[in-house]
Amino acid sequence: MCVGVPMRLKEIDYPLGVAEAEGVEMPVYLHLIPEEELSPGDWVIVHVGFALQKIRPEEARETWEILREIEALSGHA
């Protein structure tokens, strides 16, 4: 199963950026989202280092809640 996770953009040097989630920072490729649509602080879905789409902060929060629930149910929490 492939999972994209919500990450918050900290830095943008288009077409690259730095995103953070749960205390983990990583470089991300931003090619798939137009430069004019992105600002530091925006939330994006990241999969294998690529930002796939911009999302609202509420969507990011809800997604992290679901991921935590899945983790707890799997016994890996």
Image: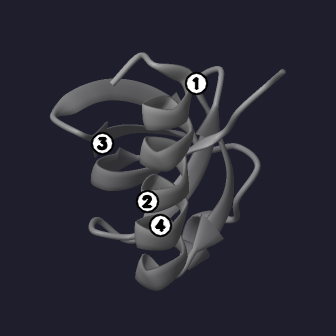
**The N terminus - image quarter:** top right
Residue at (54%, 75%) from the top-left corner?
59
SS of the residue at dot 4? helix
Q: Classify mark 2: helix, strand or loop.
A: helix
User: Residue at the location (53% across, 34% down)?
Assistant: 73
Comes first in the chain, label 2 or label 1: 1
Of the pair 41 and 72, the residue shown nearer to us = 72
Question: Sequence order check: which comes first, mark 4 or mark 3?
Answer: 3
Q: Are marks 2 and 1 in contact (CB under 8 Å)?
A: no
Q: Nearer the viewer, residue 20 or 72?
A: 72
Give the labeled residue for mark 1: 49
On residue 60, which mark appears? 4
- Vertical relation: 42 (above or below) 58: above
Count neighbours of disc 3 (C-alpha within 10 A) and say few if under 14, some if 14 to 19, many if 20 or more: some
Q: Is residue 45 visible?
A: yes
Could you tell me which residue is drawn at 48 percent across and 31 percent down?
71
Residue 65, numbered label: 2
* Dot 2 amino acid type: Glu
Which label's residue is closer to the chain start, 1 or 3?
3
Label 1 packing within 10 angstroms: few (<14), some (14-19), many (20+): some
Mark 4 packing: few (<14 Cα in 10 Å), some, or many (20+)?
A: some
Which of labels 4 and 2 is toward the front?
2
Mark 2 or 1: in front is 2
